[in-house]
Image: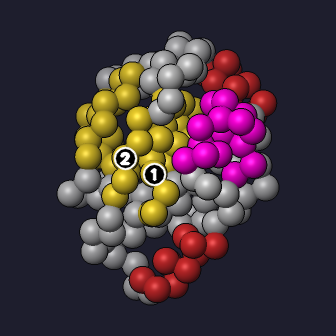
Amino acid sequence: MLGPETFRFDPDGAIPNSHLPLLVYRQAAPAANATGIERLFTANLWPASWRNGVYPFHHFHARVHEALGVARGRASVLFGGPAGDVVRLDAGDVVVIPAGVGHCAVDASADLLIVGAYPAGSARPDLQRGRPRDESGIRGLIAAVLLPEADPVAGRDGPLMRLWA
């Protein structure tokens, strides 16, 4: 497996983002197989939580990191807030989003199916929509999120463990 693509985002005034890089693993999961992605994530200590798409508005999670596995279709997702980077995701791709990093679907195929997961033992996912009333409190929540025990794609020895150390 090739290492993931990495993206870094500075705070943009509305989205806090993170010092940790966003990771994009190309063709790392079984395409057209949501159950296979759920098994991959769960085996690597990121229990699969949901199936759906990506919200079409800027948002981030202050209490938890998130993994998205594209089971079917394709999407263009804007990461890092309004001034961030658009990344095209295709079936089989996995993206790992650090707490605080904004994401927003800008385009998606009608058949898009995403499997979402969070690290084992993490807090319950929250949904923040930019310009928080208490910016320092949000930054504190993000800073307190623990690093995961494993990479959702490659387990305890996966690239995330080195890239997020």
Q: Is residue 29 magenta?
A: no
- As displayed, is residue 128 above or below residue 70? below
- The residue under the point 26% across, 41% down is 86
Q: Are marks 1 and 2 in contact (CB under 8 Å)?
A: yes
Q: Residues within 10 Å of mark 2 (few under 14, many from 20)?
A: some
Q: Is residue 34 left or right of residue 131?
A: right
Secondary structure at badge 2 equals strand
Q: Is residue 161 magenta?
A: yes
Q: Amino acid at mark 2?
A: Phe
Quarter of the rendering occupied by the N terminus:
top right
- The residue under the point 33% across, 69% down is 11
Query: Residue 5 location, x and y as percent?
Result: 41, 35
Of callouts 1 and 2, the N-terminal one: 2
User: Magenta residues, as a range?
Assistant: 148-163
**Dominant secondary structure (helix, strand or loop) of the stretch shown in magenta:** loop
Front-lying residue, 8 or 103: 8
Query: Residue 13 location, x and y as percent?
Result: 28, 74
- As displayed, is residue 123 above or below residue 94? below
| Residue 123 seen from this side | yes
Front-lying residue, 76 or 6: 6
- The residue under the point 55% across, 70% down is 142
Quarter of the rendering occupied by the C terminus:
bottom right
| Residue 61 seen from this side | no
Front-lying residue, 36 or 153: 153
The residue tagged 1 is 21
The residue tagged 2 is 7
Query: Residue 28 location, x and y as percent?
Result: 54, 21
Q: Amino acid at mark 1?
A: Pro
